[in-house]
Amino acid sequence: MNKRWVLLVPLLLFLALAVLLYRGLFRDPSVLPSALIDKPVPEFALNLLQDGKPVHRADLLGKPALLNVWGSWCPSCRDEHPLLLKLAGQGVRIIGVDYKDVDADALKWLGSLGNPYAFIIRDDQGELGVNLGVYGAPETFLIDAKGIVRYKHVGVVDEQVWSEQLAARYQALVDEVKP
């Protein structure tokens, strides 16, 4: 009798693993859970990329924004950059987090491609990225006027992502602060 159970253990382990893998086939890889949803952006004390002036969490407050984590080393960031320029031109407030980058490379990149950011937080050590739970770049957080994270998108923000996932949420946050 004991030998039969021993023979069933590998079969049961295989079936459990197969169920887990099967479930994974239907998950959207751009949807990663974030512990920060409905919580404040973590406190930080870093510097601005352009002039080295100090920047803190309080500088994010006042208006809703897209907090966009990017780097000049990131090919996918280059793919989303034209849309960010377009959105900034339409009045969308975008704050950049230059993640684990070399300042000269980032400034050259912005000089050549344009700058959609209201300001850029220099996160060369990845400290803010770690506190935000960043897996890599690009990642975009939708934050409200009080600095609360309302949504997180992992991957490139393109026209489809903007129209289907971010635009209405952003507009709702803008409408909340209108007098």
Image (cartoon, rainbow, N blue to C red):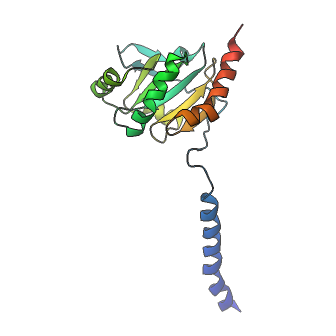
Location of residue 164 (image quadrant): top right
Location of the C terminus (image quadrant) = top right
> In the image, is residue 22 above or below residue 160?
below
Name the spot of residue 70 as percent of width and height, x first: 43, 32
**Which one is in front, 84 or 129?**
84
Q: Quadrant of the N terminus?
A: bottom right
Q: In the image, what residue occupies the spot 35% across and 24% down? A: 113
Q: Residue at x 48, y 26 (%)?
A: 84
Image coords of residue 119 (percent x, y): 45, 17
Q: Residue at x 64, y 73 (%)?
A: 15
Tell which residue pokes out farthest to the top in this image: 179
Q: Quadrant of residue 12?
A: bottom right
* Residue at point 42%, 14% (across, down): 54
72 vs 124, nearest the viewer: 72
Give the vertical position of 18 relative to 144 (above or below).
below
| Residue 92 appears left or right of 175 | left
Along the viewing direction, whichever of 140 and 2 lies nearer the viewer: 140
Across and down, in percent, residue 45 comes to 46, 20
Image mark count = 0
Coordinates of residue 156 in the picture (x, y in percent) = 49, 37
